[in-house]
Amino acid sequence: MAASFHSDRSWHFDVPPDQLWERVNATSEYPSWWPWLHEFDGTGPITEGSRWSCAVSPPLPYTVRFVIEFRRVFVGRAVESEISGDIAGWARLTIDDRPDGSSARLESALHPTNLLLRGVGSLARPLIEFGHDWILDEGRRQFVTRAFHD
């Protein structure tokens, strides 16, 4: 098995958890928020058993195609999902209340399954990590800018 990439990121939002959850559930808006999301078939709210097909292009010469299957959904609080496709593993999003808004924590453990990505990952792990981190950091920035201010 190829090396895993683990992430554990937390972000603060100046809105209460219910408003953050509402925006996370605005799935029809995802393509307009994230121009690097080239394919996306998610519609409607996040529910247990839902499956989304996605294609993501970081600022690197490849596109990653994968499916997100939502295994457990605690409405307004947390989502646990399984990822399969060019990458595989799991991800969990947790939303918590804070005195000044809310926080979102995204944890994941993913590994490449696509032969090209496995090869690049073993030879140029910093390149794969850069692409992964760019998607998370840019995705959060674009989410705040577009989901709450447009």
Image (spheres, grey):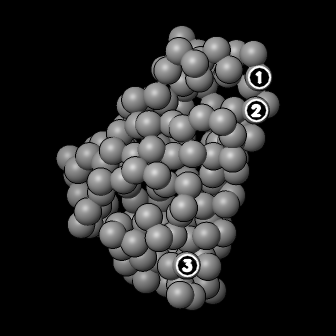
x, y percent for residue 17? 46, 78
Cα separation between marks 3 and 1: 33 Å
If you read the primary sequence from the N terminus, does the residue marked by circle 3 or circle 1 appear first? 1
The amino acid on which the numbered mark 3 sits, given as a three-letter code, is Arg
Up the image or down, 132 lies above or below 145; here it is: above
Residue at x 69% of width, y 32% of height: 128
Up the image or down, 15 lies above or below 97; here it is: below
The label on residue 12 is none
x, y percent for residue 95? 48, 66
Find numbered disc 1 in the image and state the secondary structure of the residue it sits on. Answer: loop
Where, by quadrant of the figure, is residue 4 drawn? top right
Q: Are marks 3 and 1 in contact (CB under 8 Å)?
A: no
The amino acid on which the numbered mark 1 sits, given as a three-letter code, is Ala
Residue at x 53% of width, y 63% of height: 34
The label on residue 124 is 1
Q: Are marks 1 and 2 in contact (CB under 8 Å)?
A: yes
Residue assigned mark 3: 146
If you read the primary sequence from the N terminus, does the residue marked by circle 2 or circle 3 appear first? 2
Residue at x 63% of width, y 31% of height: 5
Quadrant containing the N terminus is top right
Where, by quadrant of the figure, is residue 18 drawn? bottom left
Query: Badge 3 local density, few (<14 within 10 Å), some, or many (20+)?
Result: some
Find numbered disc 2 in the image and state the secondary structure of the residue it sits on. Answer: helix
Is 99 in front, or is 39? 39
Find numbered disc 3 in the image and state the secondary structure of the residue it sits on. Answer: helix
Residue assigned mark 2: 127
